Amino acid sequence: MAKTAKKTTASKKDSTSDSTKKKGFSRQHKMIFGTLLLLFSIALALSFISFYIYGQQDQSAVHEVANRGIEVRNWLGKFGAYLANLFVYEGFGVAAFIFVRLFFLTGMYLILDLSVRKLRSSWFWDSFVAIIVAVIFGFFATKLPELGGVIGFEMNDYLQDYLGKTGTLLVLIFGLIIFLIFRMKVSPDAVKNLFEKTKNKVAEDFEALKKSREESKSYNLEEFAVAEEPELVKKEPVVKPASKFEINKEDIKPTINNSSELNLDPKPKKVVSVPELVVDEVPHHEEFVIEKVAEEETIEENTASRLVADFGLFDPTLDLSNYKFPTLDLLKEYSTGGITINQAELEENKNRIVETLRNYKIEIAQIKATVGPSVTLYEIVPEAGIRISKIKSLEDDIALSLSALGIRIIAPIPGKGTIGIEVPNKNPTMVSMKSVIGSARFQEAEMELPIALGKTISNETFVVDLAKMPHLLMAGATGQGKSVGLNAVLTSLLYKKHPAEVKFVLVDPKKVELTLFNKIERHYLAKLPDGGDAIITDNAKVINTLNSLCIEMDNRYDLLKDAMVRNIKEYNDKFKGRKLNPENGHRFLPYIVLVVDEFADLIMTAGKEVETPIARLAQLARAIGIHLIIATQRPSVNVITGIIKANFPARIAFRVTSKIDSRTILDTAGADQLIGRGDLLYTNGNDVVRVQCAFVDTPEVERITEFIGSQKAYPEAYLLPEFVGPDESGTKLDMDISERDTLFRDAAEIIVTAQQGSASLLQRKLKLGYNRAGRLIDQLESAGIVGPFEGSKARGVLIQDLSSLDDFFNNEKNTF
């Protein structure tokens, strides 16, 4: 990871952001355009200056640029004379120099690859003040039109025609006040503080001057007293020069009140008062300097800010910076793009609904229809006094009168004061994947993992965020659209997320549904480091993969703990801000999406070995970016246990055969009334939404995977941590001391000190990859330092302290 970070740092200087590359505006283009603007600003400045020197002489040659026989005095020739005439004389006058500054700043921002958006405010306010300055010069300097230019003169003349001179002056003052308040951030409080600060400074200076005068006056009085009144001076103790000092022998005899120490200082002691520091006996001839120790600064944040300023935010997509997302033309358009409304069918269904309800003495006050791709929703408002349960009980009678399969009554519709009756269309419209992927709702979705499922009854694209679900349970009878739904989910993520941002773990017991995604193995797929296929079809290998995901989950939680963040988004933001050191094991964490096409088959063959890691992932993995999508024919209690089901609030139900199955999936009826062919109900713990799933065919998926697979990829697929099963643990790998890893003793000391036998601990402390750390754990187990593998728990440490470890190594040397 450290090498990757260094490579990223080195190449960041010569790279632009991914968004800039998508627009086709590279770093070289910015350099060229910025240099052009920089030189143009210098040319403007020179032409403006020379205009005020030779402007009148060049005035006649401005409009004869093509005539080579006419000479001009402008320093930039005819081109400069034309620019000066355009910007200064016919423009803003002296205020035209403001545009020199604007072009210069824009050029510097482009050359330094800074955000040009920050200049929007400068362009607006500088243009504003240029107009104000031009009008001011036009107001006061009427005899010098070159100062205000044509714009200043004409605007001033226009304002005076309507407002007069006084009104024009007030408008100019108001414009200056707007500029000072919004641009210069001048406020009454700031002005008040400025006056108070100035007043306090003057008062302090006055006090200091007064004090210095009083001190000098007192010194003069003392000298005068010494000169005029010698008899008074004799009464005071006389301090003799340093070269002539006398010692009174009687005074230095040791007594209770007089110590035996000699004071040979010719001058009396003085006490120098310093805040929080008292210094005695400072000789007048020694320079006394007090140094204040500088406080230590916290450099972590400063270092991160400096790195961001030098290299920008870390870009996880830099390794595949030229990656291109699939285009919409790879998908097929199955319909004309609109819904065909059969007016006669709508009128007939409405009449039958009203007639059926009237037969049971239920009057309707209002009815309206909303036509969807495969289902039409009839919203009715019954007369006052009609019980909703009475209408709900007539579901089969209404279906009989309409001769339609799949009548579903929503009583009442959430958020509305109406009752809904969903009736299938005789000629349903197919919803293509192209129409939902190309919709603005999906393209502009600001979600971590957006999924376009299809279209609702109101013909709106239905987009949900997998990161918010956080896990998805799909169920339905055979042939009702589960596999197409999985393809729609994967296709949505391929169209929205870069290979560096998301990885898929695909489990396909059928062995034929997800094999097309093998072509994007080195872009999007994650697998175990055993060299096998990325698409998992062997149930025995599924167990190792699920346990490996549990290890990955634990490792990620350790990284989040070290980074002091709560979820993967905060962690990645902190890593992009270069606040985490890759040398300490930190790395950018992509989202991992586990897709299981037929979960019931895994439970039948593996049982508890699959249920335990799935339950752990469902409970804990949401915060660190591991999300599960599980599809099954019927999520019965023996397939989806209560613990797993409780962590799957997001459910998708395709058509099932009985109400019991519908309640098992959605905790409510309705899935048994669907019409099949991608007709589904979606719930995330609250309302149930009916959606027509988007159809994506096998040739479309094949084109998408070929488009992605033909581009530059990573050297290998995203490797999950190595998992050693219980039957493989405890093998005597390195009984010979000479075959042990060179870091064996260091690893043993770390494990014994921490009393925790985990490979992730060795990764962080010794800065190793997971494979080498796993081998060290195996060697420590074979040596008897750590205990055997215990599933998701850390291994036990069999040696209690470092002294016992030293005895262990000494005995081992004597043995061998």
Image (tube, rainbow, N blue to C red):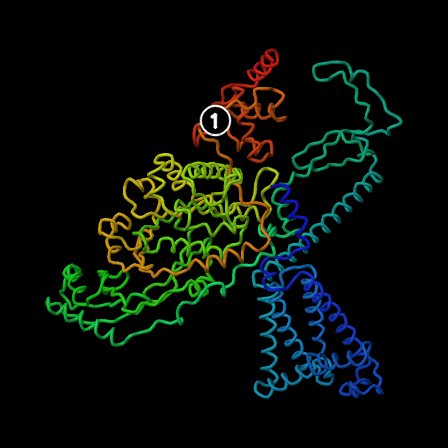
The relative height of residue 804 versus residue 233 in the rendered view (above or below) is: above
The residue depicted at 34 percent of the width and 68 percent of the height is 429
In the rendered image, residue 312, in percent from the top left (x then y), is placed at 63, 52
Between residue 189 and residue 398, name the one nearer to us: 398
Query: Is disc 1 surrounded by few (<14), some (14 to 19) or many (20+) residues within 10 Å?
Result: some
Find residue 767 and report its image quarter.
Answer: top right
Three-letter code for the amino acid on which mark 1 is drawn: Ser
In the rendered image, residue 257, in percent from the top left (x then y), is placed at 70, 17
| Quadrant in which the C terminus appears | top right
Left or right side of 58 for 766:
left
Find residue 265 and report its image quarter.
Answer: top right
SS of the residue under disc 1: loop
Residue furthest front as drawn:
512
The residue depicted at 74 percent of the width and 71 percent of the height is 40
The relative height of residue 686 versus residue 766 in the rendered view (above or below) is: below
The residue depicted at 79 percent of the width and 19 percent of the height is 262
In the rendered image, residue 812, in percent from the top left (x then y), is placed at 58, 14
Residue that carries the numbered disc 1 in the rendered image: 729
Find residue 61 and report its image quarter.
Answer: bottom right
The relative height of residue 706 versus residue 590 in the rendered view (above or below) is: below
In the rendered image, residue 646, in percent from the top left (x then y), is placed at 32, 43
Left or right side of 760 for 678:
left
Between residue 212 and residue 440, name the one nearer to us: 440
